[in-house]
Amino acid sequence: PAAIPSAAMSAILDPPPPPPLGAGGALSLKAAYSGTAAGAICEDCAPFSETHYPKGLNANFLLGDATAIVTEHIAKFEDPEKRDIARAAPEVVQLLIEVGALSKSTVVADIGAGTGLFVEVLAQVAESVFAVEISPAFVAHLQSQVESKALKNVSVIESGPSDPHLPRNSVDLAFICDVYHHFEFPKAVCGHLLEALRPGGRLVVIDFIRDEAVHKSHPAGWITEHVRAGQEVFRAEIESAGFRLLDEPSIASLAENYCMIFEPAATEQ
């Protein structure tokens, strides 16, 4: 199989920076970033460990043979014996239903859909699903899965690093599971998600607790290198884009992850 073209990758890995943060947001995020793994390369770029990610924050998903990328990550992402999220996927979907974020009338955007762990199960519950992915290898795999499984209510969208390419006012739930820490331009992406949400829409983020005392599924030091910042930083980024935290429900089988549910701040009474 052909490798992903390098020209396409350079356009993804070296995009023009998104619009700058407002003064208040820039100051608060700069202060929050003081405890992260590495400095940002520009004001709006997410800081990350260049030791852990020598070729870039998302190079493992973008560079190389497409078939090899998909095969490797299916093994990593979808094995319930190796990944807590894969084992807990039914519980996560049930939580979304219980908090009122997911129903038969919901249009869902699965942001960073990867190899499709949640796509089919979301499609079984929701009205429709946008499977949004930055990796061309994953996009091709998702499209193949949609066709082979006849998932008629699923559309695959190839996103950019700062724009998920969702239509305005198109979704009721933006779902980001174990993906937010890979956002290169978090405030820009969240700004687009805010525009994509319909009235009453929700943003749900599940990510790793960045704490060595909590994280036991990888070697010591991995979590602070792999995940660029902790929950308080991610919350500050999301809120600076115009969201308000609604809830932090627990997921019993996810000891190493937290969940945050947001709504557009403009809906606050």
Image: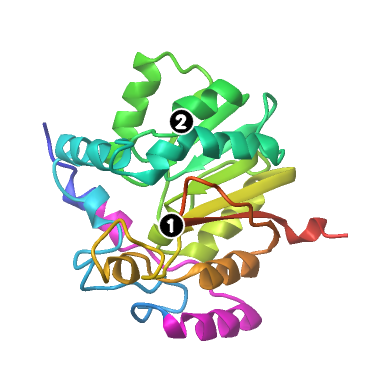
* Left/right of residue 154 with respect to residue 22 in the rendered view: left
Quadrant, the C terminus: bottom right
Residue 209 at x, y = what percent? 45, 63
The secondary structure that dominates the magenta segment is: helix
Relative to the observer, which residue lies in front, 130 or 219? 219
Which residue sits at x=56%, y=35%? 93
- Which is nearer the N-term, disc 1 or disc 2? 2
Name, please, the residue furthest toward the right: 269
Magenta run includes residue 29: yes
Q: Which element is circle 2 on?
A: helix
What is the crowding at mark 2: few (fewer than 14 residues within 10 Å), some, or many (at least 20)? Answer: many
Q: Which residue is mark 2?
A: 119
Residue 170 at x, y = what percent? 64, 38
Q: Which residues are magenta?
A: 9-35
Which residue sits at x=19%, y=43%? 4
Foreground mark, 1 or 2?
A: 1
What is the crowding at mark 1: few (fewer than 14 residues within 10 Å), some, or many (at least 20)? Answer: some
**Location of residue 88 (image quadrant):** top left
Relative to the observer, which residue lies in front, 45 or 98? 98
In the image, residue 136 above or below residue 51: above
The answer to whether the residue labelled 1 contacts the one labelled 2, judged by CB atoms less than 8 Å apart, is no
In the image, residue 14 above or below residue 122: below
* Left/right of residue 51 with respect to residue 234 in the rendered view: left
Q: Which residue is mark 1?
A: 256
Which residue sits at x=15%, y=38%? 68
Which residue sits at x=58%, y=45%? 174
**Location of residue 23 (image quadrant):** bottom right
Residue type at mark 1 is Glu
Task: Please name the colour scheme applied to the rendered image.
Answer: rainbow
Quadrant, the N terminus: top left
* Left/right of residue 17 with respect to residue 63 in the rendered view: right
